[in-house]
Image: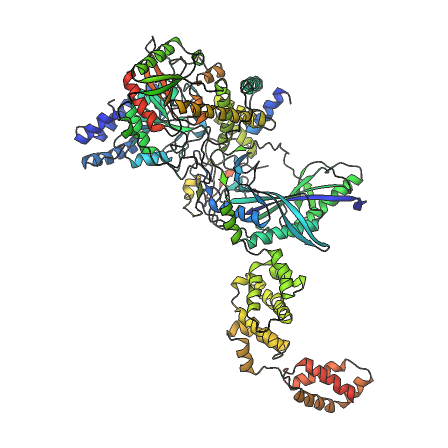
């Protein structure tokens, strides 16, 4: 029975750092240049060349470590991981083996049942390899632009118990590294990469089952699908009397299955030893303090704060913090509201989640590049909560805010769009409409309740849409019930 | 060849030009071709540099190395000039950058006249392991010049150049210097940049200087030493000022430590004769001789070989025929087969042997037993030397157990060859500076060298003592 | 693994190929290493920390400032096989 089993999953995530230069040489990390244009004797592995450590790489490692509650190792060194591959120029990768710079951290993920803590075993610094292109030519083509780019490897504890948890963990990592400004979190383009280690065991047992490693997870959804698939595959195999073999699997996204890698399972004997060309890294309390002070508010904390401080629903808060500059924009708008009430905050949130995000998505820009001044939205919301305009009018104005560069108040004034909230006036209008439509009034009273909408629309038509719908509805109800 | 100091004075006086001197060098190198000391001669580049030197001398502004004719071991990267490491693997390799030491010597007015032969990838003690033929001892007679910097040493010993650079990982500058009768100096680890030195064993390698006298060595050292931002293992120190230091008069009294006699048991009788007689000369000139015990000396060679081959196996992994170097032409083979064939055919037997040993000691299951133990033994050596130098100014010992031996004499048994490094490897293990100076000859007239060692970063004082001892011994 | 298997394993790791004779020679030489180790094991290494670096320096950093890379012609100059922009190797399986 599937429920008798528990999945045990650990994720290894590699993030490509947004430093200006590579980890061990001064070549640029900028993308999109022609092949082999960003290389030098060091990252090409030329005889006699030596690595030099980029300080920013260490800064970013400490930053991520502190943001995930890790211990920062006071003194750490680099190691060589030795293996042969055409896009690994030195025949070894400079990495950290025995004593990584960060260890024993964790992050919280949100599940339906509440929050769950996923441990982080270690975070260490290493360098990327180049790219091999296999299918364009008879030969394999090698481009070493990416060789030497700085990476951080984040290894989770095997605390993940489902594909859904894995997805949440990965999204958290992505959000955090983007908030910290150290990585652009793009799984599809490879600046964030994920491998999963998956095993299953009967519930209640402590012993780990044999695990497989699943690679080629090139989208967030595929991470979830692949893990789900592999968990089920293992359970079914065990249930039918088979045993799990420790393979490296690839996720085949076309048929939605994990498959054993075809290449020879060569013994991975990396012969780690301390890198003699680089000296050790010593992290002082002062250094950590400097970095700690620069840490931004992280996504989960910000989400909680949006819920508590602004009374936003969890759903809204989640959407607003997903991208850091959208959250910044929200706070900017909110700071400019005249009336600071939960109703206002909710309205701001609605406007951002619908109209604003639609535009950002169409234009493929982050909120930081959105030119609409935050005070315009604040003003719009102020006009709404004071019933100066109706939401229908607000929707009409909004596109004009983008094109005319006039503030909402200016537009309302210019076009006379202020809502009619004068009760006496509306009462007289309502009475007129009802007396002009006596037949329909009879039909309404006889039970055709959908005629109510007709009466409302007639009043609105008379007022060119400016009558306050709430008041119209109140008065209509009163008049219809009284007669 | 006249000494550099004589040349420099003459050039300043206008009685000789660098261009003439350089031309003579090139012609002499050609005449002595049979020595096989040079793999590449850069005549046009050298003459171009010589012309610049002439101008500097003429205008009375000679730089530190003005007009000095230099040979470089062919494992030092020279932009635009073939650098082979005496290997088929790099037979046609032309570097695209200069080693830091090359930039520095150029800036000081040095003239690079050619690249010298060596044991392939600096692995050997006789220069019999070159893919381009062995190097001859200047005295001929089928003798080896020593190695791995055999070509550079012979270039100096045969009077072809003023100075030559070699590399010293376990004695590869000092040992050939002793066998050929010249001065061979290995600085403190980190005193000279390794950027551009093709790595053999990164934590042991240092560029070393070969010359016929200590003052030329000191001058060159001052020109190329000092921190290099491209090599993180260089010490945070400026260039040395040894030329000034060596001219100071010898101290009236100083302390010289010596190894226990039991350590010298494997030495040739001639070597011992020179050793003891020179020690007596030192005694007569102010030396107080004290015994030194460096614990773990029995393990020097095994420790060295484990660490050096391990690092070498990793450093030579970049030679895979992908981006440069020898690629074996294959049919429809895959990339992995291409790499195996290229490495198998491109590397010589000794190099492959050391790669195998190094790979073995690092492989899974053996790391703790071999490599880690060797690292501990290494610290024991370092501690031992630190202790010696609290009590003595220098350590005095033979450079090699025997004078130059015949070709083929030690190639049958690799272990015999390794043992000839006994007196030199410890300085690389501890990172301390060491120098071999000519000290006498054997009964057959073969050169015998004696070695001085000092504590880390005491390079200038080491050269100072070496300068004076050289004069006392010769 | 027996000695011959060990040699073959190590040769594969090192990407080298040997004849049968050479492999037996290596098997012997690996045994010799063991005798080397005996010498080290006779030392008293109790409490001795492994020496990983000679240099006592720490935190030798480089500022994160871009410097020019090599021109493409220099990058590919020594390439055994290439096209205009890439290194070429036989198909990777």
Question: What residue sits 80% from the left and 39% below the top?
Answer: A240
Instruction: Give the image location of residue B121, x and y in percent.
Output: 44, 26
Instruction: Give the image location of residue C85, x and y in percent.
Output: 47, 44
Left or right: A446, with B55 as reference point: right
Give the position of the N terminus of chain B as an image quadrant.
top left
Against A131, residue B273 (above or below) is above
Question: What residue sits 80% from the left and 37% below the top?
Answer: A241
Left or right: A304, with A232 as reference point: left
**Is any atom of residue B139 visible in this view?**
no
Instruction: Give the image location of residue A368, x and y in percent.
Output: 53, 62
Question: What residue sits 40% from the left and 22% below the top?
Answer: B391
Which of the 4 quarters of the picture holds residue B151? top left
Tally the marks: 0
B50 vs A473, nearest the viewer? A473
**Is any atom of residue B452 visible in this view?**
yes
Instruction: Give the image location of residue A428, x and y in percent.
Output: 68, 90
- Scheme by which the image is coloured: rainbow
Against B271, residue A174 (above or below) is below
Give the position of the C terminus of chain B as an image quadrant.
top left
Against B405, residue A410 (above or below) is below
B343 vs A401, nearest the viewer? A401
């Amino acid at each position: 029975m599937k429920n008798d089993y528990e999945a045990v999953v650990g994720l290894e995530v590699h993030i490509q750092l947004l430093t200006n230069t590579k980890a061990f040489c001064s070549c640029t990390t900028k993308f999109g240049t022609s092949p082999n244009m960003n290389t030098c004797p060091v990252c090409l592995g030329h005889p006699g060349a030596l690595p030099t450590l980029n300080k920013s790489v260490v800064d970013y490692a400490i930053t991520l470590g502190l943001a995930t509650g890790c211990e920062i190792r006071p003194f750490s060194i680099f190691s060589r991981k030795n293996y042969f591959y055409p896009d690994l120029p030195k025949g070894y990768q400079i990495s950290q083996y025995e004593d990584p710079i960060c260890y024993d951290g964790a992050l919280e993920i949100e599940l339906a049942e509440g929050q769950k803590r996923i441990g982080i075993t270690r975070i260490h610094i290493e360098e990327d390899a180049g790219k091999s292109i296999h299918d364009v030519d008879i030969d394999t083509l090698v481009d070493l632009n990416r060789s030497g780019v700085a990476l951080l490897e984040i290894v989770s504890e095997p605390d993940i118990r489902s594909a859904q948890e894995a997805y949440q963990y990965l999204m958290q990592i992505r959000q955090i590294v983007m908030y910290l400004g150290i990585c652009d979190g793009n799984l599809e383009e490879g600046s964030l990469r994920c491998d999963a280690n998956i095993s299953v065991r009967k519930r209640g047992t402590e012993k780990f089952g044999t695990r497989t490693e699943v690679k080629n997870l090139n989208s967030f959804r595929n991470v979830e699908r692949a893990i789900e698939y592999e968990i089920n595959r293992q359970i079914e195999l065990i249930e039918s009397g088979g045993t799990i073999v420790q393979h490296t699997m690839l996720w085949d996204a076309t048929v939605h299955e994990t498959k054993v890698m075809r290449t020879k399972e060569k013994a991975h004997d990396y012969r780690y030893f301390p890198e003699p060309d680089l000296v050790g890294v010593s992290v002082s309390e002062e250094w950590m303090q400097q970095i700690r002070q620069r840490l931004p508010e992280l996504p989960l904390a910000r989400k909680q704060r949006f819920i508590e401080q602004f009374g936003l629903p969890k759903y809204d808060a989640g959407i607003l913090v997903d991208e850091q500059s959208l959250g910044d924009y929200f706070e900017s708008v909110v700071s400019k509201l005249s009336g600071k009430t939960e109703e206002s905050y909710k309205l701001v949130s609605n406007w951002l989640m619908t109209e604003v995000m639609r535009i950002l998505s169409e234009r493929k820009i982050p909120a930081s590049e959105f030119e609409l001044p935050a005070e315009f939205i604040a003003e719009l919301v102020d006009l709404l909560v004071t019933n100066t305009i109706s939401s229908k009018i607000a929707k009409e104005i909004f596109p004009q805010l983008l094109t005319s560069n006039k503030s909402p108040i200016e537009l309302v004034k210019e076009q006379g769009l202020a809502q009619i909230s004068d009760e006496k006036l509306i009462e007289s209008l309502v009475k007129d409409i009802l007396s002009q439509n006596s037949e329909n009034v009879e039909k309404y009273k006889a039970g055709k309740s959908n005629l109510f909408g007709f009466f409302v629309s007639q009043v609105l038509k008379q007022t060119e849409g400016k009558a306050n719908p709430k008041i119209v509805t109140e008065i209509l109800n009163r008049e219809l019930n009284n007669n | 060849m006249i000494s550099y100091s004589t040349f420099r004075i003459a050039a300043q006086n206008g009685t000789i030009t660098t261009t003439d001197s350089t031309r003579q060098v090139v012609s002499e190198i050609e005449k002595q071709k049979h020595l096989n000391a040079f793999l590449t001669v850069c005549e046009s580049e050298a003459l171009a540099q010589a012309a610049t030197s002439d101008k500097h001398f003429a205008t009375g502004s000679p730089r530190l190395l003005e007009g000095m004719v230099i040979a470089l071991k062919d494992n030092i990267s020279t932009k635009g000039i073939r650098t082979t490491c005496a290997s088929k693997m790099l037979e046609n390799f032309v570097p695209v950058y200069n080693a830091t030491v090359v930039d520095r010597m150029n800036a000081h007015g040095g003239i690079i006249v050619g690249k010298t032969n060596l044991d392939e990838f600096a692995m050997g003690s006789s220069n019999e392991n070159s893919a381009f033929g062995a190097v001859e001892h200047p005295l001929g007679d089928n003798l080896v010049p020593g190695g791995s910097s055999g070509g550079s040493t012979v270039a100096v010993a045969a009077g072809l150049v003023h100075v030559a650079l070699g590399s010293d990982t376990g004695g590869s500058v000092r040992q050939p210097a002793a066998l050929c009768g010249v001065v061979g100096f290995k600085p403190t680890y980190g005193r000279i940049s390794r950027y551009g030195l093709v790595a053999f064993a990164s934590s042991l390698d240092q560029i070393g200087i070969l010359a016929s006298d200590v003052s030329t060595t000191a001058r060159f050292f001052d020109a190329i030493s000092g921190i290099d931002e491209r090599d993180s293992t260089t010490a945070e120190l400026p260039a040395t000022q040894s030329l000034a230091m060596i001219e100071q008069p010898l101290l009236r009294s100083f302390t010289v430590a010596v190894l226990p006699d039991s350590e010298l048991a494997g030495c040739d009788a001639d070597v011992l004769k020179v050793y003891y007689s020179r020690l007596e000369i030192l005694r007569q000139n102010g030396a107080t001789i004290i015994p030194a015990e460096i614990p773990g000396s029995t393990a020097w060679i095994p420790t060295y070989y484990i660490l050096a081959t391990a690092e070498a196996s990793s450093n030579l992994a970049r030679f895979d025929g992908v981006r440069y170097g020898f690629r074996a032409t294959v049919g429809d083979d895959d990339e992995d087969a291409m790499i195996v064939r290229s490495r198998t055919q491109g590397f010589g037997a000794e190099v492959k042997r050391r790669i195998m040993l190094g790979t073995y000691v690092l492989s899974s299951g053996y790391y703790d037993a071999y490599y880690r133990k060797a690292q501990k033994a290494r610290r024991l050596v370092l501690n031992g030397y630190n202790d010696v130098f609290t009590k003595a100014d220098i350590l005095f010992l033979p450079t090699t157990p025997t004078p130059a031996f015949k070709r083929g004499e030690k190639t049958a048994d690799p272990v015999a060859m390794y043992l000839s490094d006994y007196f030199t490897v410890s300085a690389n293990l501890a990172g301390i500076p060491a120098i071999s100076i000519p000290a006498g000859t054997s009964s057959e007239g073969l050169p015998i060298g004696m070695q001085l060692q000092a504590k880390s970063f005491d390079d200038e004082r080491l050269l100072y003592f070496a300068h004076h001892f050289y004069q006392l011994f010769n | 693994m027996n000695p011959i298997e060990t040699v073959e394993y190590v040769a594969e790791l090192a990407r080298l190929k040997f004849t049968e004779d050479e492999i037996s020679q290596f098997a012997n030489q690996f045994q010799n290493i063991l005798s080397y180790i005996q010498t080290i094991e006779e030392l008293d290494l109790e409490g001795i920390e492994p020496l990983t670096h000679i240099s006592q320096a720490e935190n030798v950093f480089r500022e994160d400032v871009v410097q020019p890379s090599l021109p493409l012609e220099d990058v590919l100059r020594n390439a055994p096989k290439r096209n205009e922009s890439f290194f070429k190797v036989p198909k990777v399986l």
